Image (tube, coloured by chain):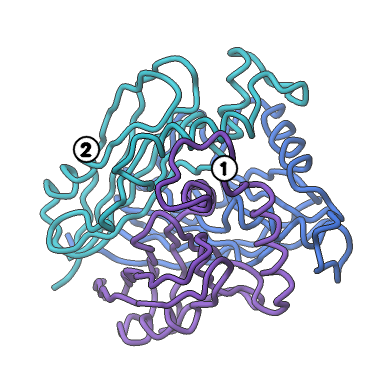
Chain colours: A purple, B blue, C cyan
Amino acid sequence: MSTRCVQSTVEVHTPGRGLHDVTARVRDSVRASGIATGTAHVFALHTSCGLVVSENADPDVRGDLERWLSRLVTDGDAIFAHDAEGPDDMAAHVRSALTGVSLVLPVADGTLSLGTWQGVFLWEHRTAPHRRSMRVTVTGA
Amino acid sequence: MSTRCVQSTVEVHTPGRGLHDVTARVRDSVRASGIATGTAHVFALHTSCGLVVSENADPDVRGDLERWLSRLVTDGDAIFAHDAEGPDDMAAHVRSALTGVSLVLPVADGTLSLGTWQGVFLWEHRTAPHRRSMRVTVTGA
Amino acid sequence: MSTRCVQSTVEVHTPGRGLHDVTARVRDSVRASGIATGTAHVFALHTSCGLVVSENADPDVRGDLERWLSRLVTDGDAIFAHDAEGPDDMAAHVRSALTGVSLVLPVADGTLSLGTWQGVFLWEHRTAPHRRSMRVTVTGA
């Protein structure tokens, strides 16, 4: 059976810095595509947030990830020349380069096929709430 | 020629923390797919290991990568609330977020098409040995 | 409409360490493929450079990213055993593991479909100028 390619856009509102579970939103896009076997590409159209696969059970993991990264990438670091939108502006670009803005996930049996403890998270790197758009491209048979 | 999509699962046993070469395993999946031109998506179904492309010639590189990352992400860091499985538990989740659990690799002439010095490595982030599953999806013509 | 898969190679010369905009080069490969909807996979065939999506407007962002990463990953770090090609050799491998060598980007309306402020950058991690090859695989309808 030959493959098809189905594209959609998912919008989410984030309450500010931290990891926000978007697994159900991506799963909806995969189901709507009607594709049974293949991959789902999720791409955030921004340079100050990220996308990661992480643990979906204990909320402490999300808190720890955020605390660890906030300590590594200091807001208002004296090394930064770019600060047009405040002390978290350039820190958010660094965090985005480290976490990436793109994920490819397996699709099997017509659904997103993750490990038992895996979720898909949009990691908001700015301190203020934002509206974020993700382009989802499902490719497969 | 229209494209196809072939999925398989690869299991590996890791002896504990560090980079383990899985290039031959991924190459086997690509060859078995019969696909000549396209991409291979490799996805680890876990939140405490990672997948990276790295140097395949000098084992010192793997040792240096592991030593560098162990120093950056401290086991039992006082900042961590999540420690259900010991001091390396949350450190492994941070390491996994940094390295990622997903790779897309080019396929050309019916085989994995990497640079001369590139290998594919499963990076075990836990200190104990683990069994790890990777889903491989080859898409192409 | 069934999908196709078109592969090409892009070569760039880098003047040394830092982020180099390759958006136009990738866009050319996407247009030449004739594919309207799908994904573009860009893969650097090296272990001492990286590929990232980052801010394309203010050159200060590129400078800040390079300064921040140079400080995090110290050239000639005493922890490194591998130094065959000089103090930036192993640092470049660490930087490459952190930034990744692979990107998947959305293709829509026959062109690369990025966010308003997003560009595609080859991040040279060695201090000397290098010639770098990227394999671009466009898959879609």
Q: Disc 1 sits on a residue from what chain?
A: C
From the top left corner, tell me how far across and down residue C112 is, in percent: 21, 54
**Residue occupying the point 38% across, 63% down:** A44
From the top left corner, tell me how far across and down residue B126 is, in percent: 79, 56
Residue A62 seen from this side: yes
Q: Nearer the viewer, residue A29 or C43?
A: A29
Residue B54, quarter of the rendered image: top right
Residue A139 seen from this side: no
Q: Secondary structure at mark 1?
A: helix
Task: Please tell me whether residue A83 is drawn above or below residue A79 in the rendered image.
Answer: below
Where does label 2 land, which residue?
Answer: C25
Q: Disc 2 sits on a residue from what chain?
A: C
Task: Please tell me whether residue A110 is drawn above or below residue C1 in the rendered image.
Answer: below
Image quadrant occupied by the C terminus of chain B: bottom left
Residue B85, quarter of the rendered image: bottom right
Left or right: residue B128 versus residue B25 is: right
Residue A4, quarter of the rendered image: bottom left
From the top left corner, tell me how far across and down residue C80 is, in percent: 73, 24
Where does label 1 land, which residue?
Answer: C98
Give me the C-alpha separation between circle 1 and circle 2: 24 Å
Q: Secondary structure at mark 2?
A: helix
**Residue occupying the point 41% across, 77% down:** A12
Image quadrant occupied by the N terminus of chain B: bottom left
**Mark 1 / mark 2, whichever is N-terminal:** 2
Q: Are marks 1 and 2 on the same chain?
A: yes
